Amino acid sequence: MPAETEFVAELTAVLAYTADTRDVGPLRELTEEAARREDLSKSSWLLAKCELERELCRERDAADAVMVWEGLARHAAGLPDEDPARLVINTMRAKYVKRRGHPGDPERAAELYRREWERRRRLLPEEDPRLSTARANYAVAVRDRGRPGDIKEALGILEEETKRRVDRFGAHLPFTWIAHVVLAQTLILLAEETDDPEERRRLAAEAADNTHDKLTQRRRRFGWSHAATLRAQVVRAHALVLTGDLTAAIEILDPLVGQEKAMQIEPGRCDLLLARAHREGHPVKALHHAGTSARLAVSVWQRTQAEKLVAELTVT
Amino acid sequence: MAYPVSQLETTPTARWLADMRRAKSRTQYFHALRTLLRDAHDPARLPTREELNRLTGHDSSSTIYSVFNQDSLVHALDGPPRTSRLGRLDIVAKAVIEAKVWSYGEYRTGWIKALRRCPRWPERTVATSLLHTIVLWATHEPEFAIAGCYAPPYSAVQDLCVVVDGTLSEPEAEQLLQSVVETADGPLGDLPATVVDVVYDRLLDTAFQAPEAILRSLEGQRERVRDVLHLLDRMSEDEVGRALPHGVSVELLRRFAEGA
């Protein structure tokens, strides 16, 4: 099927272009052409459509994105389970259900990710990296579900997954670094939950270890301003705030303030970490950052943390 | 401006492929090769001449020689060292080299269409998009990818040399692509971007970080800087001060534009 092969090759190259330039024009054009062509399978068109929607959903409201992926899931209903477009659709639907913020969504997202992980376990060999991705996605969904014991369960899966990636694929790949950073985030969440200062320091130190050389590697591979590089820096800074390495944390965070949208993290997250880092040394700076963080917060956790700091610092 | 593909259309392998597309006997052998490689217990072992002749229905053992010695890819390739190295290979190994180029043909056409379609290709992305395409070929044509010690299609080797504007020699480009093909044969093959990550540093170190590559890239900016200088010359000192980034002077731009 020459037309099919040529199309998938063109799509592959256009995706490499889109990833580096964030210009979705050619991908949109290619997808529209594919919809009109009669010499292409539904699977090929749907794959292009999924890749286009994946890009467009970066700028969409999560609730709208859920509707897009549910619509695509209906389109894909007749395709086999292992069709590449179906794998994308299942994952993306779960991702935006998790972000949507409706009551019950975290539960549903964890369930969707669990189903996808099980589906891939049925379809793919044990060493397939797409199975690794589904396993890590499921762990993060469990972590963010918020039931008692969820973070510890997620941590167990992520520790195993990180080790698996290091052993199987090598420590030098971004695919492995992602696992380290997600593991570090999870260790930080557990550290934030614990009342035992020694345990908190131990967990945070482990999180810092998991991000130690990842920043240099990320900067070298993706450049300083890449969203994933910036996010990894915030994770490392958070770990350093908890271990008490405040100067190093401030050095990382200062240039990142206000860039949360580019990093795709909660607005005001860097301000909250800076407020905590400055709390003892510069209470005035700390109060300013805490106020900003409280004003911008979306999550209950961040708002509560920031408001608590504002209250403490105002009394002082 | 889309990537200029004219140089890619005139590489020796590209011309050879365009000429042989309608060569029926050759493609018959390629299909037979694919089948025999697919059915082999050891994918690294090449089929014998006899096996190929049997499957293609040729009684005479000399047919394969007459098919592959005529208009062969080896003759189409430039440069004595390569010609002599390939010249020493047996006829089945030569057929495998050609089959790789032939089986990669549609993938290459798709890649070139993408180069034409997209308007603003960063140089590095042209190279990485080629690597992505090779991963796709290797995972869809595993028989040809594995055969001959994971050697990449020669057309891709020459394309990569064009894309990096000669900063890689053909043997260097071949080695780099060979790593891509070999990695794609493992579990990472289903994540093309991760396969590319495996050789990314090597690609940058050898092809893009070479001093001559940086110099060429800067040379390419001279005309634009001259254009900006033309505008700056018409502006007041105050306006120029506001227009230029901190630390950049008209003098600095002029020295760069004039090649000092």
Image (cartoon, coloured by chain):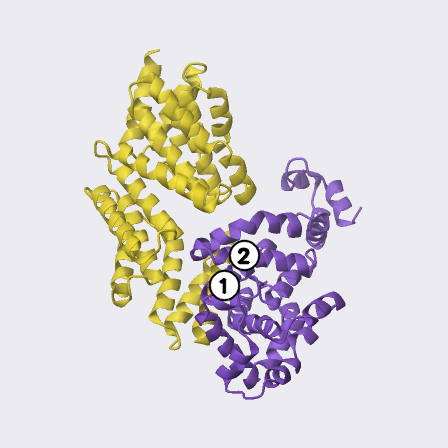
Left or right relative to A301: residue B57: right
x, y percentage for residue A6?
Answer: 48, 71
Residue at 61% over, 49% down: B202
Q: Between residues A237 and A103, which one lies in front from this camera angle?
A: A237
Residue at 29% over, 44% down: A138
Residue A303 location, quadrant: top left
Disc 1 chain ID: B
Q: Which chain is purple?
A: B
Instruction: Give the class, few, some or many, for how many residues have Cα within 10 Å of label 1's Cα (few <14, many ≥20).
Output: many
Instruction: Give the class, few, some or many, for how many residues have Cα within 10 Å of label 2's Cα (few <14, many ≥20).
Output: many
Residue sitting at the far right? B260
Q: Which residue is mark 2?
A: B180
Residue at 66% over, 63% down: B162
Q: Colour of chain A?
A: yellow
Identify residue type, mark 1. Ala
Which numbered disc, 1 or 2, marks the residue that appears first in the sequence? 1
Q: Which residue is mark 1?
A: B138
Residue at 77% over, 44% down: B255
Left or right relative to B201: residue A266: left
Disc 2 chain ID: B
Q: How many numbered markers are drawn?
A: 2
